Image (cartoon, helix red, strand yellow):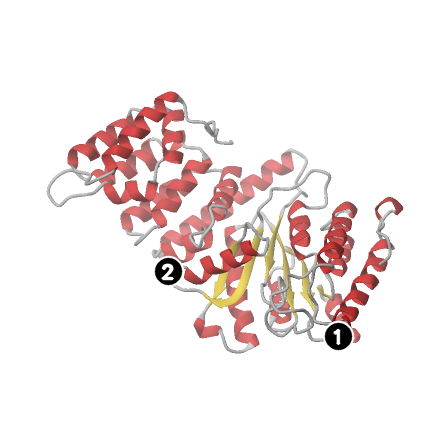
Amino acid sequence: MTIDIAPDAPIPSVLSKLDEIRQRMASHTDREDERRILEILAGSTAIELDQLLLQLDLPALLADVDDRLIGPDNRTALLELLTAERLGDLGVPARAALASALQRGRTGRLDEQALRRIWLGTRGADVTRLKNALDGRGGYRDLHQLFYHDIDDDDLREELLAQVAREAVSAAGSASSAGSASAREVKILSDIDDTFYANWKDTRYPKKTVYPGVLQFYAELDRGPGPEPGRAGDLTFVTARPGDRLGLVEDATIKALAERGQLAATVLAGSFTRLIGNRAIAEKKLENFLEYRRLYPEYDFVFVGDSGQGDIHFGTRMLELAPEAVRAVFIHDVVATPDLARRELAASGVHLFDTYIGAALVALERGLLGSEGAARVAEAARAAFGAIPFPSHADQEPRWLELARDVARLNAALPPSLQLDSI
């Protein structure tokens, strides 16, 4: 069952209720204010309540409505109202907004029980929509943060993960009955440094250069190979950069990615304790992947990394531990790996490439991109390459030759109508 979503434009009755609630939250919210807010919410229709939750500052609302030592437990009553009595009236976006608000600050027992009711009260394909809605809200308060950091009760975490697994099976069963069981979408996991842009060992490009074609490669993997595009927004960066309790590293990383053209992404950070040594970095990334896979069992995965900092080990371990779910591992080669080693790695499912045109060719061969998508990656790479400020012609020429070689290889796999002019 899909939960109906209220229209974007608030209906007139919502505007007056919204105005009164905001006025009562504007200064000190006393018992009478809290009583009236509860009364407004409880007396709203399903559409009104859904729209109110999408328009209100929910973190502020949850902070303003209190339980008291002597007097009414209004916060408890508010959470009971929204996550038990009226949960069925809330669409997926409103549920995601409420779950995100419960992540703010310390997530106590009352908040965890409210989160439990939200998750256990969401079923089938709506669970997938709820998870993606949380990851799509931006910032470090994402689905992984909620399950593995904000929820402290291990038993509760396992209960909710079991619910996620059950409902993923349910959603898959529904897709199978509709004749589309094979149409599993793909989550794209990617490293950042020397994968998204030149920022560690790769001195062949000017520092901080976004690799030509990488943005389009992500977009086409996200779109999928079929004539109808898949759900947008399935890119997650798995980085060695250590996370922190306030999410400063993740938020700064998201901002830096946006400034370079990647406007939407989730970030899974590393840790200070595993910052030294490629193997330690890879094992932390693997831990994040295994946790992330439990959150999204209904998805397949691809990984895009580089050959400079443990990503080959990480990709190999992904394939070993989840061969049925990992569709491919793409490794941007920044250390001139010998051809024999490349062929051996490719036989195990780890594909090294020099340009994102070469990566698009591998993705085309593995059914992850369609011909038109691969051609779009090549066109984007060629256009971006021309704008790179190489210090000299001697620095530019080897990279240009790689690009020209991969265009020729891709052209051999494309129909004549999509082949690119030689460069």
Residue 101 placement, left or right of 380 = left
User: Is residue 222 visible to the viewer in this orientation of the structure?
Assistant: yes
Q: Residue 246 at what x, y percent from top left?
A: 37, 60
Q: Quadrant of residue 248?
A: bottom left
Identify residue for label 1.
Answer: 341
Identify the element where label 2 is drawn.
loop
**Which circle's residue, 2 or 1, is located before the other in the chain?**
2
Q: Marks 2 and 1, how far apart in space?
A: 42 Å
Residue contact at pointers 2 and 1, CB within 8 angstroms: no
Crowd around label 1: few <14 · some 14–19 · many ≥20 (10 Å): few
Q: Tell me residue 7's x, y (percent).
A: 47, 27
Q: Foreground residue, 34 or 385?
A: 385
Which of pointers 2 and 1 indicates the residue nearer the eye?
A: 2
Question: Measured along the vertical axis of the image, is residue 334 above or below residue 373?
Answer: below
Relative to 150, 409 lies left or right: right
Q: What is the number of the mark on residue 246?
A: 2
Count the marks: 2
Q: Position of residue 233 (x, y in %)?
A: 57, 47
